[in-house]
């Protein structure tokens, strides 16, 4: 499979282009719409704990992805990894199918979440009706598919430009706080002794409530870190993948963690947390307060919209390679394996993912989408890969590993614990939904297998 993909896809992305693609995917509209939610859940500046926990999880899980991506630099990411670490004939085949099954729902939801968030922030510039917001979100998806309909080298160059805008905007936000920042306000944690004898944060009556709030807040923060693995979906298009995949993952997590922690700190150090928690346009209000200018706030909002567009650009790019990889291996509809004859990219898969993202952007609301996205992926993708890496190390200790996580297996174990902490500290309806997708996927897998075997038997007769 690897050889076949390498012949069809071009290794045209350098380390810095791959890192840029990761980082613009990670930022997007996420931190600007989740920051108020996180601050509200944690009752103030203690929300920095959720961002720190999200960064820790990104590092721990990022090391898992770095090992797998450097070892198997192919298109499709988790689709390939789950087969390799669990065996390509039985359990690995099932896990890979479950990943494709949930990706057909989750990937368009990711695209929809970014497009809906874009449309929500757009209303700060131009007040529009709910129907018009849907037109904005749907139109954005169509525009991005058109931008991605080109060769990978051109996309790499566009990604670097988009990252310069992204990083520059967040640095502007952080350094604008100079002269307006209150250290005491930014770190007013109000640690108290709770009724059940534990130490907690003011506003929570018990440690149980605090842990539940931290779990929900960390899920929202983790949503904003997602994308550090996008380079793995593009494994067949990365130059010197044995080195550059792991480097781009760790570089992007480090850069984004610094930016997010800086942004969290300055926003709650300038604006009262109650205002932050209630705001739909927290960054815009932040700039308006500092510069005392609605025009400056509008300019900042325009840059945030470009960041949101950049993130979706990167996300659609990565997700379009997953159905392609499955089709190449005979596990998905063969038409998705087609590559553009001139520009060498999976154009059918790109168009299909874009079309579903367009439809979902018209149907759903942002808050529900954010939680559903992560809860859907935790068990099949993130936890399974971390467990699989541990099993792989012990079953095949002498396998060549271009990148090996330091302090193995601690990063993988920490990753599993944090993912499960998030999973069990969120609304039960999302846990039931995630379980339902897994069960339905298992049923679909064995039905597909049954009918395939029956067709093969009939063909032999």
Image (tube, grey):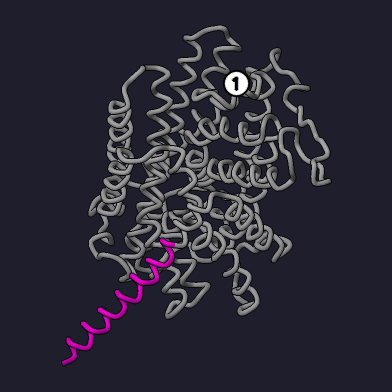
Name the residue at the bottom extreme: 461
Q: Quadrant of the C terminus?
A: bottom left
Q: How crowded is the residue under tag 1: few (<14 C-alpha within 10 Å), some, or many (20+)?
A: some
Which residue is found at the position 52% from the left and 52% from the top? 229
In this rendered view, identify the residue nearer to me: 338 or 281.
Answer: 281
Quarter of the image where one finds residue 453: bottom left
Q: Quadrant of the N terminus?
A: bottom left
Residue behind mark 1 = 275
Name the residue at the front extreme: 195
From this view, report whether residue 460 is shown above or below residue 449: below
Quarter of the image where one finds residue 174: top right
Measuring from the top left, give residue 181's x and y in whole percent. Answer: 71, 18
Mark yes or no: residue 19 visible: yes
Range of magenta residues: 436-461
From this view, report whether residue 325 is shown above or below residue 172: below
Q: Dot 1 lies on which element? A: helix
Mark yes or no: residue 55 visible: no
In this rendered view, identify the residue nearer to me: 90 or 197.
Answer: 197
182 relative position to 280: left or right: right
In this rendered view, identify the residue nearer to me: 157 or 146.
Answer: 146
Measuring from the top left, give residue 441's x and y in whole percent. Answer: 38, 67
In this rendered view, identify the residue nearer to me: 136 or 156.
Answer: 136
The prevailing secondary structure element of the residues shown in magenta is: helix
Quarter of the image where one finds residue 256: top right
Measuring from the top left, give residue 265's x and y in whole percent. Answer: 68, 28
391 is within the stretch colored magenta: no
Measuring from the top left, give residue 414's x and y in whole percent. Answer: 68, 58
445 is within the stretch colored magenta: yes
Name the residue at the top extreme: 292
Which residue is found at the position 32% from the left and 60% from the top? 8
Which residue is found at the position 49% from the left and 46% from the top? 371
């Amino acid at each position: 499979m690897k050889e076949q993909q390498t012949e069809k896809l071009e290794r045209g992305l350098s380390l810095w282009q791959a890192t840029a693609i990761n980082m613009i995917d990670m930022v997007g509209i996420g931190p600007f719409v989740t920051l108020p939610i996180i601050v509200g859940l944690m009752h103030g500046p203690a929300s920095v704990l959720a961002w720190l926990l999200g960064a820790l999880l990104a590092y721990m899980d990022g090391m898992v992805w770095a090992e797998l991506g450097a070892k198997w630099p192919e298109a499709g990411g988790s689709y390939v990894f789950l087969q390799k670490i669990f065996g390509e004939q039985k359990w690995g085949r099932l896990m890979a199918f479950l990943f494709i099954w949930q990706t057909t729902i989750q990937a368009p939801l990711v695209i929809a979440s970014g497009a809906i968030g874009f449309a929500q922030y757009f209303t700060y510039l131009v007040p529009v009706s709910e129907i018009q917001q849907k037109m904005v979100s749907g139109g954005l998806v169509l525009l991005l598919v058109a931008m991605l309909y080109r060769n990978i080298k051109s996309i790499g160059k566009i990604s670097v430009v988009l990252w310069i805008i992204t990083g520059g905007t967040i640095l502007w936000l952080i350094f604008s706080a100079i002269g307006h920042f209150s250290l005491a306000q930014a770190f007013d944690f109000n640690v108290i002794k709770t009724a059940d004898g534990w130490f907690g944060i003011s506003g929570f009556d018990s440690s149980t409530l605090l842990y539940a709030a931290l779990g929900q807040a960390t899920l929202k923060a983790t949503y904003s870190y997602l994308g550090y693995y996008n380079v793995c979906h593009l494994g067949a298009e990365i130059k010197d993948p044995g080195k550059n995949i792991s480097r781009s993952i760790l570089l992007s997590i480090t850069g984004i963690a610094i930016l997010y922690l800086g942004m969290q700190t300055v926003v709650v150090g300038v604006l009262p947390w109650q205002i932050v928690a209630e705001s739909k346009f927290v960054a815009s209000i932040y700039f308006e307060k500092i510069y005392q200018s609605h025009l400056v706030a509008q300019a900042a909002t325009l840059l945030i919209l470009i960041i949101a567009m950049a993130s979706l650009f990167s996300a659609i790019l990565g997700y379009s390679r997953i159905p392609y990889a499955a089709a190449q291996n005979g596990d998905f509809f063969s038409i998705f394996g087609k590559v553009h004859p001139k520009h060498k990219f999976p154009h059918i898969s790109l168009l299909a993912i874009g079309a579903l993202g367009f439809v979902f952007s018209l149907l759903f609301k942002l808050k529900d989408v954010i939680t559903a996205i992560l809860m859907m992926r935790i068990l099949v993708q993130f936890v399974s890969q971390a467990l699989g890496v541990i099993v792989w190390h012990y079953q095949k200790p002498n396998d060549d590993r271009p990148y090996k996580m330091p302090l193995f297996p601690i990063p993988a174990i920490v990753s599993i614990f944090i993912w499960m902490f998030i999973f069990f500290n969120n609304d039960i309806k999302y846990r039931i939904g995630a379980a339902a997708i897994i069960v339905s996927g298992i049923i679909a897998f064995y039905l597909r297998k049954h009918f395939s075997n029956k067709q093969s038997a009939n063909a032999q007769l």
